[in-house]
Image (cartoon, rainbow, N blue to C red):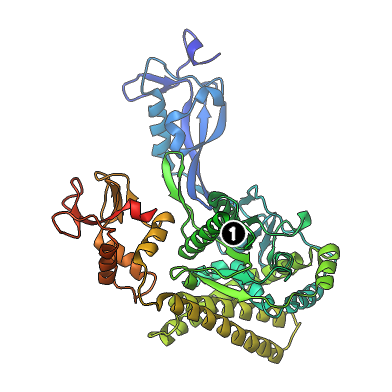
């Protein structure tokens, strides 16, 4: 039986205020379920359906779907009056009216890796494992683990002291890059503590060395957290599509992804394409903005939630991306025999070490967050007039703090003494300062040229999608868009263009930029004016840069 084959005389039990029969069941809300996941919160209502004979049944319906429920599919006794057009809406309104008077149940869907706050509890989702505080009550919390593509594979025969000892030995195999890689990886794991303290680690670590340095073996071995039982290696390469790379990075929440193969052996076209991909990914990670895409009818923009390490044979970076990355050179390969022994016979040692670290991190989360908060306040006060680029200063800060946290874990696990931890930290801090100063020098050299190629800079920004452009003049919103494409020109509002340029470095001059564009014949002039007025934008004027000059 279905709604189109309704009995001749249904036993109506639910009527509206005018006495019009609505349904053969009386609906009532008995509870609200609020489900929290990484994409936000959704609500559902538990509904009791009572029938004429006194029996009842219960079902759960998303609140947003109440108007569209097919009650007959839920229970074949549920019939609605087909002659009353508002029957389903009346049922939905009746249920909604009762929602405010029923108990609320909270549930959590753990559909991403990293820290969750559930009530007073702190937990860390590590792929297929949920790591809780050691002081947490041994009761089943109100959450369910989502289907994640990541597993934290561990070797239960390795105790904490062995894991720390062997991990520190692995780090020491390459003094040039080992400590920085470890700090970068730890910063990804404790990202939530940084974020709650008011800072998000968002620099890309670029490991550079000639062929034969074992970069592609050593780097993933030291930083790969998940799925190590399936093999150890980079998650993707630069010849993948930008979308695939972004999707891969998005999945690596609160951990570190490795992108490999930025080398000189490719053709010039492929080499440039890989460099453009690297530059754009660096910018997107640093700005924490992924590509906009459609999710149903809504456009969403993803944020990156983890770290990235690039492996290459040469240094990359333009003025706009150099401060967003930290280059670390490797000139001596790690001991290949030792590394091979670890990869073949102890592939899960590193993930086991990180498992022990995460357990400790969860227990000390509040202390770590508060310590970062205090040190961040000191940093901001001490650098009111900084000589180092702000992004590089922040990179140095979060890597130093992360290495400090790593050593605190080692110390509390009784692996090293307070004095040993201090000596190791001072050595790392000195090494890191040298790396940051070298990157600062690269940045200054990139902008300290006689003439800045503003057209090339704008061309790069345009190709990387850095400008927020309206679809057309009618859809242009000055508070949202930088400009629009109009008559084969990239039309940008002056203030928005200036702000975009100044976001790279305060030394860039907007006046010089316009003069440079004029000298290159890149601006479309109307009646000798540098700007054009576009109908449909409320009289707004724009700098119209010819698209032919941006190709």
Q: Is residue 406 visible?
A: yes
Residue appearing at x 13%, y 55% in the figure: 527
- Which residue matches tag 1? 253
Residue appearing at x 52%, y 83% in the figure: 437
Res 171 → quadrant? bottom right
Res 462 → quadrant? bottom left
Q: Is residue 54 visible?
A: no
Residue 14 locus on image (x, y percent): 43, 23
Q: Nearer the viewer, residue 46 or 365?
A: 365
Question: Image height check: is 254 above or below 328?
Answer: above
Q: Nearer the viewer, residue 85 or 324?
A: 324
Question: Image height check: is 302 above or below 176?
Answer: above
Question: Image height check: is 401 above or below 309?
Answer: below
> Taking 226 as reference, is 239 left or right?
left
Question: Image height check: is 229 above or below 355?
Answer: above
Q: Nearer the viewer, residue 251 or 244?
A: 244
Residue 157 locus on image (x, y percent): 85, 66
């Amino acid at each position: 039986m279905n709604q189109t084959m309704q009995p001749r005389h249904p036993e109506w039990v639910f009527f509206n205020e005018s006495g019009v029969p609505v349904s053969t069941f009386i609906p009532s809300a008995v509870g609200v379920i609020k489900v929290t996941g990484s994409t936000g919160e959704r609500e559902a209502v538990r509904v009791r359906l009572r029938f004429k004979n006194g029996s009842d049944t219960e079902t759960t319906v998303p609140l947003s779907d109440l108007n569209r429920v097919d009650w007959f599919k839920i229970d074949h006794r549920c019939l609605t009056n087909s002659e009353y057009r508002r029957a389903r809406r009346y049922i939905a309104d009746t249920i909604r009216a009762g929602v405010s008077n029923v108990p609320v149940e909270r549930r959590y869907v753990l559909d991403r890796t990293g820290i969750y706050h559930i009530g007073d509890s702190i937990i860390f989702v590590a792929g297929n494992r949920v790591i809780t505080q050691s002081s947490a009550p041994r009761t089943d919390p109100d959450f369910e683990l989502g289907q994640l593509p990541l597993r934290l594979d561990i070797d239960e025969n390795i105790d904490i002291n062995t894991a720390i000892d062997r991990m520190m030995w692995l780090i020491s195999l390459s003094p040039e890059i080992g400590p920085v890689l470890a700090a970068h990886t730890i910063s990804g794991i404790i990202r939530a503590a940084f974020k709650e303290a008011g800072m998000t680690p968002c620099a890309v670590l670029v490991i550079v060395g000639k062929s034969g340095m074992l970069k592609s073996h050593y780097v993933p071995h030291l930083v790969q957290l998940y799925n190590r039982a399936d093999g150890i290696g980079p998650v993707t390469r630069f010849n993948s599509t930008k979308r695939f790379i972004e999707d891969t990075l998005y999945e690596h929440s609160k951990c570190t992804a490795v992108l490999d193969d930025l080398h000189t052996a490719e053709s010039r076209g492929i080499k440039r394409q890989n460099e453009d991909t690297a530059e754009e990914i660096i910018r997107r990670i640093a700005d924490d903005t992924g590509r906009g895409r459609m999710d149903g009818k809504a456009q969403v923009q993803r944020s990156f939630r983890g770290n990235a390490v690039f492996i290459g044979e040469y240094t990359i970076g333009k003025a706009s991306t150099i401060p967003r990355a930290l280059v670390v050179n490797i000139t001596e390969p790690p001991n290949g025999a030792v590394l091979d022994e670890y990869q073949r016979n102890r592939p899960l040692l590193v993930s086991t070490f990180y498992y022990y670290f995460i357990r400790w991190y969860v227990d000390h989360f509040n202390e770590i967050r508060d310590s970062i908060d205090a040190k961040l306040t000191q940093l901001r006060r001490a650098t009111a007039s900084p000589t180092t680029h702000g992004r590089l200063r922040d990179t140095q800060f979060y890597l130093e703090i992360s290495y400090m946290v790593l050593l605190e874990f080692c110390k509390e696990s009784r692996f090293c003494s307070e004095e040993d931890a201090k000596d190791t930290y001072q050595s790392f801090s000195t090494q890191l300062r040298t790396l940051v100063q070298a990157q600062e020098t690269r940045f200054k050299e990139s902008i300290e040229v006689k003439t800045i190629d503003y057209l090339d800079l704008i061309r790069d920004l345009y190709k990387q999608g850095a400008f927020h452009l309206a679809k057309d003049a009618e859809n242009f919103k000055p508070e949202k868009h930088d400009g629009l494409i109009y008559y084969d020109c990239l039309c940008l509002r002056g203030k928005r263009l200036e702000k975009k340029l100044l976001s790279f470095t305060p030394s860039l001059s907007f006046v010089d930029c316009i003069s440079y564009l004029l000298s290159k014949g890149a601006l479309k002039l109307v009646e000798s004016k540098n700007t054009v007025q576009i109908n449909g934008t409320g009289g707004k004027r724009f700098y119209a840069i010819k698209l032919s000059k941006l190709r």
